Amino acid sequence: MSLRLNPARLALLAILMISLSSCVPSDTPDGPVDVFVGPQFVTGDAERPVVYGLAVAEGRVVALLEREDVAKWASRGATLRQLPGEYAVPGLVDAHAHILGYGATLSRVDLVGANSLAEAVERVASYAGSHEHSAWILGRGWDQNDWPGGRWPHARDLDAVVAERPVALRRIDGHALWANSAALALAGIEAGTPDPKGGSIHRDAKGQPTGILIDAAIGLVERLIPEPSDAEEREALIAAAEALTAAGLTGVHDMGVDERTWRLMNELAAEGLFPLNVHAYASAGSELYATLRESGRQHSGRLHLEGVKLFADGALGSRGARLLAPYSDEPGNEGLWLLKPGELKLAVREALEAGLQPAVHAIGDAANRAVLDAFELGIAHGEPALPPRVEHAQILDPADLPRFAKLGVVASMQPTHATSDMGWAGERLGEARLEGAYAWQSLLESGALVAFGSDFPVEAIDPRFGLYSAITRQDHAGSPAEGWRPDERLSWEEALEAFTAGAARAVGAEADEGSLKVGAWCDVTVFDRKLGDGAPRAVLDAKVTATVISGVQVH
Ligand SMILES: [Zn+2]
């Protein structure tokens, strides 16, 4: 969708912009105006870094206000909206995450911490009551060792609350499944069913199955669980959006969506049930990507489809990240290519030529080099529509580090990965290779564009955790005392920028997002206390008191 303006409309727009950028409402916009006040607003705009309030029309900031401006706007009919909290920042954006994957974890019964069989059954009953459209009731996290008596649960315990629909609940360790009679019947599990190889079916004294399936026997039931329906995927997306906005996120760069997820997000947004600002990337093999190569980038409201998600290698924990030299703790293993350098070049070229933004997962130093090579070649064939992105950019050979700035490539990184990995990354990589690992500050100093995210559901959705990791490189207990490789820590301002303006620039949206300047969408995250000049710990203790997206308070 492109906005075409003839000269007359351009002149009108210029007049409008001049009148809007002044604080006095000499010429208020036609439609209703909201004036947000309450917290101190940090704008991210160098010219007006802190303001008293925001005037907002049609979801966008139309003026930055001082205290004395508020009465003037109110006298012109603006609606005063008091936000709870002390400290407001431009809406926090997670620049690498998986909304549906996270929503799927929410749309199951959570049995972690259930202290009795009765409590576990009650949670199942309550979930079933509020999920009438779910054909199956799925869940996880029970542990009979925490229950009085400690006996294995039974199918009939579940039958008492859900008799018609199948129920399948994984034990906390994943090695046992608790099923109700409807699930056993669907799977054809009865007295005469033999134990499968590598698994067992628990039976009572009469030889009847009890509803507990161990290891390979789990598959007898789980292979029957259907793909989620549209209704279930909608519920997962709605639940995710609620949790994400409650955590203070206003936007997400969603790494790998398919046709259906994109369609459902658009439907939900049109129904007012999905307020998030999303920049999405089609999964490489999806039908959606094939469509996108024909259509080019797609935009509707706050939903944007920017490009394609590709994978160069695996992950460090499982030694799948592709390294230039073998793992320090596994001689002979250099990790995996998911796309070999030649294939990467073709895939990147294909995306760029279609005017799409490639977002390529690269963890190991060999993978990062190969992706930068592919980008360099692609860029040489023509200026890309948006800057190509390296997702994770986790381990860089120092020789490759300056190439991000030089080529104009986005380093899309996740601070919590560093603090999750810091206990064992040195064993995998050895001291020397840590030099270019999780090197946020070095990348910033080199002039690279750094955008921050979490990779949820791999890590928690909570943006406070990412901000805290970025400024401390410590775990939540404050260890190690100086921070892990503390030279790569960021200041509060740098960390905040990577979660706001950095994320916006990564998708070429800096006029619309990432700061609270006139003309930008009014996306705001409000905390209950001032942040940035006290102990870093305050970030973890702070509460999100309000979240505003497109000028609407959604939390
Ligand atoms: Zn990811």
Image (cartoon, rainbow, N blue to C red):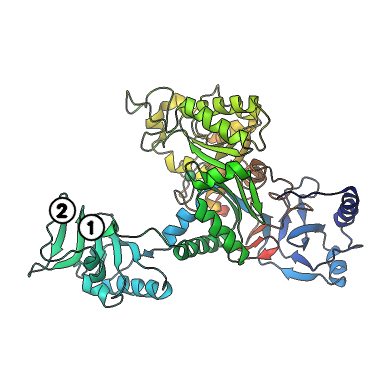
- Residue at coordinates 32% horizontally, 67% vertically from top-left? 114
Question: Is the residue 309 above or below the residue 401 in the image?
Answer: below
Name the outermost residue toward the bottom. 160
What residue is shown with label 1? 220
- The x and y percentages for residue 125 are 35, 75
Q: In this view of the protein, which residue sits in the foreground, 280 or 291?
A: 291
Q: How many marks?
A: 2
Q: Is 496 or 265 nearer to us in this picture?
A: 265
From the top left corner, tell me how far across and down residue 357 is, in percent: 60, 39
Q: Is residue 81 above or below residue 172?
A: below
For the C terminus, give its image quadrant. Answer: bottom right
Can residue 543 be seen at all in this image of the molecule? Answer: no
Q: Name the one closer to the observer, 415 or 295.
A: 295
In the picture shown, does residue 372 fall above or below 503?
A: above
Count residues near mark 1 (Cα–Cα under 10 Å), then give few for <14, some for 14-19, many for 20+: some
What percent of the width, then of the height, locates residue 120?
31, 70
SS for dot 2? loop
| Residue 393 appears in the picture as rendered | yes
Label located before the other in sequence (2 or 1) = 2
Question: Residue at left 55%, top 32%?
Answer: 348
Q: CA distance from mark 2 to mark 1?
A: 9 Å
| Residue at which label 2 appears | 196
For label 2, the crowd category at 10 Å Cα-Cα, with few meaning under 14, some 14 to 19 and many 20 or more, is some
- Badge 1 amino acid: Leu
**Which amino acid type corresponds to the residue marked 2 in the rendered image?**
Pro
Contact, mark 2 vs mark 1 (Cβ under 8 Å):
yes
Horizontal relation, residue 16 to residue 104: left or right: right
Where is residue 523? Give x, y as percent.
68, 57
